[in-house]
C-alpha cells in the first residue's frame, strides 16, 4: 500500500501537536505519526488523502490558538514496509505500574496485575495518548466486579478489555467507525474476553438497558450532545468516566453533568488533557 507523508511544521508544538494528532488519527484516516523537533510527520494511505480534511483539522487547532502558524509539505514516499517502520517506533505503555498495554510484537510482563495486547491498526486507544492513559487510571481504582459496563467510542477496545479482565459481569463496546469496531472485535478475541461489540452511536442506548459504569473517551462536543443519553441508562449511584477534552473544557462538561443529576467525584489531568468521573445521585 502506498502512503502519503504530510510533514507539518508548527510555530508552537506541545499541546497543539497533540491536538492535531488526535484529530487526524481519531477522526480521520491517518494511522501513524512521527513527532519532529518542529512539528510532526503524519502518514495516510494515499487513496485516502484529502487536503480539505487536513486543512479542517489544522483550522480547528488554530481556533484554540489564533497566533499559531503552520505550514506543510505533502510527498508520496517510495513503497516500503510501513508496518516494520511503525513497529520500530511504537512503544508499549505501562499505566500506573498496574496495566501493561502492548502490541503483539512487544514482550510479555509478569510483574503487572493486568496485561492487554492491542493490535491498534487505525483505531484510537493504545494508552499512548493522555486521555486513554487517564481513563485506564480511573479504572484502576474502580471495582467493577459483577457490574455492567459500557465503553462508548471504544476504539481499539482497550477500556472494555480492562473492565472485562476486572471481572465486570457484562461489558458492551460501541463505536461508530466500522474499522474501529472490527479492530475491537479482534482485540477482544486476542485477549480472551467476552465483550458485546456494536457498530453505531448513542442511539443504540434507547430501550431498557442499564449500566453501572459508562466510559466515554470521545471529544467535548459529542460528550455534551450525548451525556443525556448516557445518564438515561446509568444506574443511580453509577459512575460516568469521560475524557477526550482539555482542562479548559472541564467547566462546560461539569455543568452539563450537574444538570443531569451527577456530581464530580474524581479529576485527572495530564499534558493539559482532562478525565473526570461523575456519580449519578439523582435523575436530572
Image (spheres, rainbow, N blue to C red):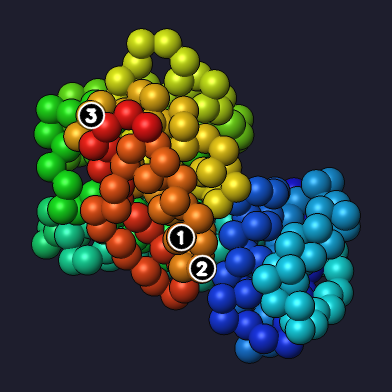
| Residue 239 in view | no
Residue under label 2: 248
Give the image location of residue 142, x and y in percent: 17, 47
Question: Distance from label 1 to label 2 (Cα)?
Answer: 7 Å
Eye-nearest disc, 1 or 2: 1
Indicate the secondary structure of the residue bearing disc 3.
Answer: strand
Indicate the secondary structure of the residue bearing disc 2.
Answer: helix
Residue under label 1: 251
Q: Residue at x 55, y 28 (%)?
A: 201
Q: Residues within 10 Å of mark 3 (few under 14, many from 20)?
A: some
Front one among 13 and 2:
13
Q: How many marks?
A: 3
The quadrant where residue 148 appears: top left
Residue under label 3: 236
Question: Distance from label 2 to label 3 (Cα)?
Answer: 28 Å
Q: Is residue 53 left or right of residue 90?
A: right
Q: Residues within 10 Å of mark 2 (few under 14, many from 20)?
A: few
Q: Residue at x 68, y 57 (%)?
A: 24
Instruction: Mark 1 and mark 2 in contact? Answer it, CB < 8 Å.
Output: yes
Q: Residue at x 73, y 62 (%)?
A: 60
Quadrant where the image shows the C terminus: top left
Amino acid at each position: 500500500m502506498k502512503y502519503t507523508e504530510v510533514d507539518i511544521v508548527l510555530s508552537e508544538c506541545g499541546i497543539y501537536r497533540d491536538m492535531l494528532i488526535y484529530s487526524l488519527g481519531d477522526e480521520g484516516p491517518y494511522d501513524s505519526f512521527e513527532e519532529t523537533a518542529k512539528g510532526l510527520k503524519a502518514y495516510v494511505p494515499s487513496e485516502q488523502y484529502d487536503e480539505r480534511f487536513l486543512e479542517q483539522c489544522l483550522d480547528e487547532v488554530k481556533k484554540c490558538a489564533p497566533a499559531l502558524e503552520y505550514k506543510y509539505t505533502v510527498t508520496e514516499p517510495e513503497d516500503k514496509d510501513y508496518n516494520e517502520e511503525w513497529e520500530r517506533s511504537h512503544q508499549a505503555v505501562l499505566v500506573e505500574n498496574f496495566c501493561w498495554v502492548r502490541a503483539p510484537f512487544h514482550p510479555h510482563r509478569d510483574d503487572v496485575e493486568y496485561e492487554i495486547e492491542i493490535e491498534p491498526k487505525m483505531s484510537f486507544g493504545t494508552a499512548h495518548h493522555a486521555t486513554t492513559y487517564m481513563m485506564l487510571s480511573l479504572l484502576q481504582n474502580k471495582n467493577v466486579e459483577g457490574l455492567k459496563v459500557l465503553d462508548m467510542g471504544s476504539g481499539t477496545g482497550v477500556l472494555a478489555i480492562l473492565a472485562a479482565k476486572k471481572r465486570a459481569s457484562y461489558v458492551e463496546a460501541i463505536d461508530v467507525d466500522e474499522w474501529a469496531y472490527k479492530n475491537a472485535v479482534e482485540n477482544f478475541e486476542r485477549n480472551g474476553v467476552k465483550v458485546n461489540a456494536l457498530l453505531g452511536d448513542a442511539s443504540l442506548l434507547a430501550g431498557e438497558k442499564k449500566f453501572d459504569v459508562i466510559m466515554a473517551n470521545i471529544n467535548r462536543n459529542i460528550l455534551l450532545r450525548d451525556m443525556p443519553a448516557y445518564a438515561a441508562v446509568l444506574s443511580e449511584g453509577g459512575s460516568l468516566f469521560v475524557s477526550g477534552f482539555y482542562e479548559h473544557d472541564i467547566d462546560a462538561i461539569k455543568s452539563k453533568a450537574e444538570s443531569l443529576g451527577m456530581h464530580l467525584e474524581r479529576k485527572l489531568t495530564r499534558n493539559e488533557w482532562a478525565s473526570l468521573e461523575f456519580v449519578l445521585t439523582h435523575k436530572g
